[in-house]
Image (tube, helix red, strand yellow):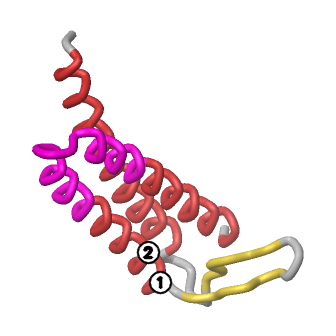
């Protein structure tokens, strides 16, 4: 495997995984939390208690924002790849990290509300 092939696998793999994490977290949260009638706990702290409440609209906002960020970063990184491949790979890795954090945040919201 050449270095160029590994670079493409890393680039496209990061964005594919990021898209899966963002979309799967959003769908998982929607399927699990759609049956709850009352307000959802969106942020909880051990020190202060419940900091933020909301509904499914906020869950959809978080999920849609994550998917849009992954898509925009993909197109931006594709443009960067021609001139600055290092920055494109850094953006790909950062986008994957952001998508994993988004997935963890949605998983935390699910665990607090069940």
Q: Which residue corresponds to mark 2? A: 62
Q: Which residue is rendered at x = 66% and y = 80% of the image?
A: 41
Q: Is residue 50 magenta?
A: no
Q: Which residue is disc 1 drawn over?
A: 58
Residue 91 image position (x, y, % from top left): 33, 50
Measured from the top left, where is residue 36 in percent x and y? 56, 80
Q: Quadrant of the N terminus?
A: top left
Asked whether the beta carbons under mark 1 and mark 2 sit within 8 Å of each other, the answer is yes
Percent across and percent down for residue 50 are 76, 83
Going 32% across and 46% down the picture, which residue do you hit? Answer: 92
In the picture, measured across the screen, residue 92 lies left or right of residue 34, that is left
Q: Residue at x 89, y 76 (%)?
A: 47
Horizontal placement of 95 versus 4: left or right?
Answer: right
For the stretch drawn in magenta, what is the main secondary structure? helix
Q: Which residues are magenta?
A: 71-96
Residue 23 falls left or right of residue 57: left
Locate residue 95, reporting x and y percent.
38, 53
């Amino acid at each position: 495997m050449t270095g160029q092939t590994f670079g493409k696998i890393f680039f496209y793999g990061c964005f594919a995984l990021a898209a899966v994490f963002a979309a799967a977290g959003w769908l998982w949260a929607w399927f699990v939390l759609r049956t709850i009638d009352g307000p959802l706990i969106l942020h909880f702290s051990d020190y202060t208690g419940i900091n933020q409440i909301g509904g499914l609209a906020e869950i959809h906002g978080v999920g849609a924002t994550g998917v849009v960020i992954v898509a925009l970063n993909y197109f931006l990184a594709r443009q960067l790849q021609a001139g600055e491949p290092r920055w494109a790979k850094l953006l790909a890795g950062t986008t994957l990290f952001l998508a994993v954090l988004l997935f963890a945040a949605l998983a935390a919201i699910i665990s607090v509300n069940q």
